Image (tube, grey):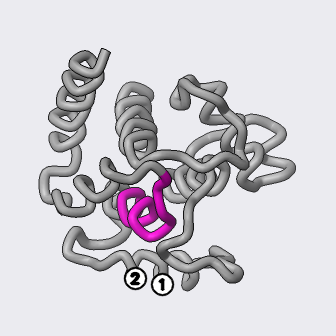
Amino acid sequence: MKIKRLFFLGLLLSCFTFFLTAQSNTVIDELLEKQNADFGRSSYMVLTASGLIDDNSTMEESIKYLTKHGWDMGDKEPGAYITLGEYSFILMQYFEMDSGIMYKIFPGPRYAARELYYLKLIDEDGSPGRTISGEEVIRILGRLMEWKESTL
């Protein structure tokens, strides 16, 4: 089981690096080690993958970008855990994805997670309030990028 997981993860990373050739390996390695992904690294991955910030940017710069463009961090710090809903919402916004009617009426973390679950980009529990692992962050982002490319 562990060997299959490592093989799958290696395969996923090799495909993922094709899309993010200049991505910081340090951030990817740090995310993969995390049982609970943090807001700073997760947002950094999304914003660099979507081309909105440079690969040489820091996690703090990714948070500044989010707040500058209307994302309400509230009292969250960059090191705080990110929920599936928050991550899905960032993905939906910064990859400018088409969505279902509920997300159009009530755009937010809840319906963003439901939308990604419906598109089968999330294969596990689609509960928007649960924390996600670093591996899930990378896996969902990789699937989203593949899905976007196949819909062009």
Q: Is residue 54 left or right of residue 85?
A: left
Please give the name of the residue rendered at 45% of the width and 38% of the height, measured from the top-left corner: 140
Q: Is residue 109 left or right of residue 35?
A: right
Q: Which secondary structure dominates the residues rendered in magenta? A: helix
Q: Position of residue 48 (x, y in %)?
A: 32, 62
Q: Secondary structure at mark 1?
A: helix
Q: Secondary structure at mark 2?
A: helix
Pick the residue in front: 108 or 32. Answer: 32
Q: Is residue 28 magenta?
A: no
Q: Position of residue 143 (x, y in %)?
A: 40, 32
Q: Which residues are magenta?
A: 36-47
Q: Position of residue 81 (x, y in %)?
A: 56, 62
Pick the residue in front: 139 or 46. Answer: 139
Marks 2/1 in contact by CB < 8 Å: the verdict is yes
Residue 128 found in image quarter: top right
Q: Is residue 43 left or right of residue 27?
A: right
Q: Position of residue 68 (x, y in %)?
A: 55, 85
Q: Which mark is residue 64?
A: 1
Please give the name of the residue rendered at 33% of the width and 72% of the height, measured from the top-left corner: 53
Locate the C terminus by quadrant: top left
Q: Which mark is residue 60?
A: 2
